Amino acid sequence: MKPIAVVTTVANREDAHRLARTLVERKLAACAQISEIESFYQWKGAIQQEPELRLLFKTTDERYALVESTIRELHPYDLPAIHAYAFEHVDPDYADWIAENAGG
């Protein structure tokens, strides 16, 4: 199992906590981290500038499809950003912990 990080953003702490808790409780992610960010983006023909919260879920590539569908199900945005990247280097014991706690 290859460990990955899945990332999304939300507008408020309540949504961030709901997503983080749900994915960890369902063992779709071993952990979730929440960071405050500021986003600039195009939306409906206008440039937006908004504070957001970034969620980073540590999981495995085998769980990606289920993680993505769960985020879509719970996400308040019309078009949520959902993307993932693989860990290029990771401590083997930590990778095992991720796999064990993300439904592995």
Image (tube, rainbow, N blue to C red):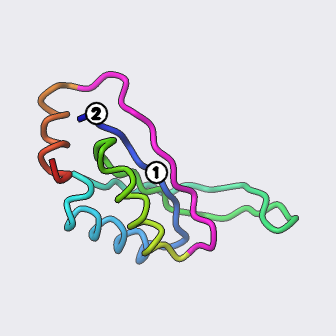
Which amino acid lies under the numbered mark 1 shown in the image of this protein? Val
Q: Who's the residue at 36% across and 30% down the image?
A: 87
* Helix, strand or loop status at disc 1: strand
Q: Who's the residue at 35% across and 59% down the image?
A: 66
Quadrant position of residue 71:
bottom left
Q: Position of residue 101 (x, y in %)?
A: 15, 51
Would you call the spot at circle 1 few (<14 residues within 10 Å), some (14-19), or many (20 or more)?
many
Q: Is residue 22 left or right of residue 69?
A: left
Q: Report the quarter where the N terminus lies.
A: top left
Mark pair 2, 1: CA separation: 16 Å
> Which region shows up in magenta?
77-90
- What residue does disc 2 label? 2
Q: Is residue 12 left or right of residue 101?
A: right
Instruction: Please say if 97 is above or below 53.
Output: above
Secondary structure character of the magenta stretch overall: loop
- What residue does disc 1 label? 7
